[in-house]
Amino acid sequence: MIRKIAVLTSGGDAPGMNAALRVCIRAGLFYGKEMYVVYDGYKGLIEGNIQQVNKDFTADIINRGGTIIRSARLPSFKEPETIKKAIEILNDFEIDALIGIGGDGTYRGLNDLAKAGFTVVGVPATIDNDVGSTDQTIGFSTALNTICDCIDRLKDTSSSHQRCSLIEVMGRDCGDLAMYAALAEGAEGVICAEYPLKKEQLFKKLRKMKAQNKDHAIIIVSENLIDINQLAKEVEEATGFTARTEVLGRLQRGGSPTANDRILATRLASRAVEIVINEEGSRIVGMKDNAVVDFPIEEAVSMKHEHVHGLRDLIEMLQ
Ligand code: ADP
């Protein structure tokens, strides 16, 4: 019989984590359970930084970015000794199940806890949208809107000066932020893991645009792939465009979550609590074809993120 449920947020913070936390707490209380939060992710877990909370804790957090219970990275969580310590702490607090809100790394930590016999449920939250067991992660929609807002502003200035803007966005190894932003902005090009740089093709396109006296060009680039400052120099030499670079960086992580992220968080977190209450085992929740789904955790951690149907065709058309 489940009596006490704890919730933590871990890994990169994402807008909508608070909305997910709010629903976990409220749903758990609704089912008559004692609810706990773990501060500072897995780091706080092994330090016993755990607090019982009531409904007041969830007031006015649905619209707040970041995570009010904070996040942290703890590389040593991979070690058996650390997992053992985490389980000791959870047992000391008599916690029956842990809900982890985070990305792939967070899931691997949860999986280690599950393998050691502790019940865990994962809720996908990361701006990168790089989680295999869901079409969309909490935070992706907000980050994408932020990127679009930044690019709209850049377009004003780059068209006033007839520039080519090279804009670096986040995403780790996943090109979703870059590809969706390229579609949403009608960008002239996108460079990401799925679409590696084809210099000559890009330069040819830009030269053609310059010859047609086009106002500006927007090229969106995923992080960690190429040196965009070097590419900007080459664009200037090869195309006649003046080029400027912008690295949007952590700006992409902040801000109030979009309505879409709040609803997504609400749907996923409520299912996570239901899984715990029904004692369905250690699972990961996600959204597939707009339906809430869940998978056994050991299956979920090895799933590869798939692009939604038709996305690549649209990008091909754009390139
Ligand atoms: P995200 O959850 O956003 O992918 P990270 O990759 O930083 O973020 O992972 C968050 C935390 O999860 C790490 O700091 C670490 O404590 C834990 N973690 C990451 N990878 C593993 C792993 N392979 N095994 C166990 N724990 C892990």
Image: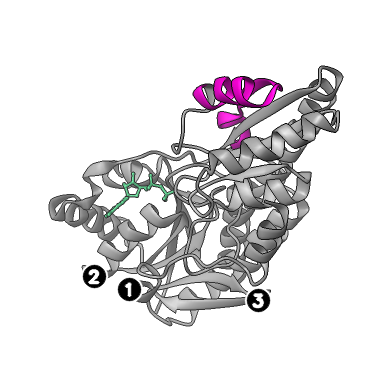
Q: Which residue is labeled 1 in the image?
A: 298
Residue 180 visible to an observer of this rendering = yes
Taking the magenta stretch, the answer to whether it contains residue 171 is no
Query: Where, by quadrant of the figure, is residue 236 drawn?
Result: top right
Which mark's residue is nearer the viewer, 1 or 2? Answer: 1
Q: CA distance from mark 1 to mark 2?
A: 9 Å
Q: Is residue 69 left or right of residue 73?
A: right
The mark that comes first in sequence, 1 or 3, is 3
Instruction: Answer few, some or many: residues within 10 Å of disc 3's Cα (few below 14, many 20 plus, some between 14 and 19).
Output: few
* 225 left or right of 129 in image: left
Q: The disc labelled 1 sits on which kind of residue?
A: Glu
Q: Residue at x 70, y 46 (%)?
A: 182
Residue pictured at 76% horizontal, 49% vertical: 184
| Residue 238 included in the magenta stretch of the image | yes
As helix, strand or loop, the secondary structure at mark 3 comes to loop
> Given contact means CB atoms under 8 Å apart, are the residues at marks 1 and 2 in contact?
yes
Residue 239 on image: x %, y % = 67, 26
Residue 28 picture quarter: bottom right
Query: Closer to the observer: label 2 or label 3?
Result: 3
Is 147 drawn above or below residue 268 in the view shown?
A: above
Which secondary structure class fits the magenta region best? Answer: helix
Query: Closer to the camera, 59 or 182?
Result: 182
Q: Nearer the viewer, mark 1 or mark 3?
A: 3
Looking at the picture, does residue 222 appear above or below residue 289? above
Q: Which residues are magenta?
A: 230-253
Residue named by callout 2: 115
